[in-house]
Image (cartoon, rainbow, N blue to C red):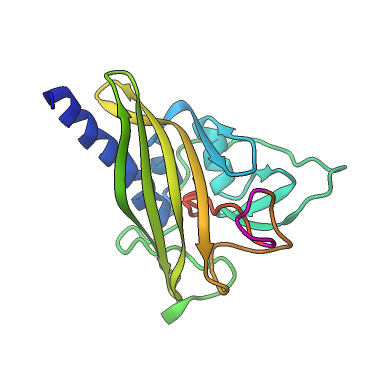
Amino acid sequence: MELWELVARERIRDSLVRYSWSGDALRLAELALAFCEDGELELRGHAPLRGRQAIVAFLGGTAFLGGTAFLGGTAAGARPASSPPPFSPPPLTLPARADPATSVVPPPGGAGAGGRRIVRHNLTNTRFLELTATEARVATYFTVVTEIGLDHYGRYRDTFVPVGDEWLIRHRFVSTDWHAPNSTMVARPGGIPGSDNPGEPSASATQVANPGG
């Protein structure tokens, strides 16, 4: 293994962790920096979101995808097809919406355990499927723990490219394989195309979404 490959692997791991840590704290502007300027976030069954601002808008709850509103990356209901939502991407200097000291996500509709909502994405089994000097294909398992315990888990399928001294996500495909019946992040408003089971969404975007991709 050559030195450039060792450096590339570590840079890619840095971007993987940036996405998860920033997403858990809802520091969406920081999360977006894990992507290329024109990077894509794709949830299974939906067209990719392209560009950092579109990703921030989606994870921040100001965009709609496939007729479904995602608030903090969670499906929250359908918008009538005759009433397309306005889309005005926010700047990437969004204020943090979490306690920077504890990385605790504010409860979306009420207090979580102990009056606070906790989201922790854990990444495992990162596999480098292909790595060249100009592109890398990477697969990673994610497991999400919230105040209820194990909330949901799934897989990221990423394409990375070098940008300056970093390796950033050009395309992230997010697939949620399972979620708890009382998941605090994955809603089930009748089901979303592309899910593993009827009545379940294909992904929560961070997923904070995450997410997720």
- Prevailing secondary structure class for the magenta stretch in the rendered image: loop
Q: Is residue 212 visible?
A: no
**What span is in magenta?**
194-199
Image point (60%, 50%), residue name: 61
- Find residue 80 and report its horizontal and vertical position in percent: 84, 49
Which residue is located at x 59 percent, y 44 percent? 44
Percent coordinates x, y for residue 126 in the rendering: 30, 45
Furthest residue in direction bottom, as rendered: 114
91 above or below 125? above
- Nearest the viewer among 114 and 181 is 181
What is the x, y in percent for residue 125?
Answer: 30, 50
For the point 66% across and 64% down, the residue is: 188
Where, by quadrant of the figure, is residue 159 drawn? Answer: top left
Vertical placement of residue 139 versus 107, above or below:
above
For the point 52% across and 65% down, the residue is 179
- Answer with left or right where residue 155 lies relative to residue 15: right
Residue 110 colored in magenta in the image: no
Image vertical order of residue 112 relative to residue 87, above or below: below
Viewer-closest of 190 and 52: 190
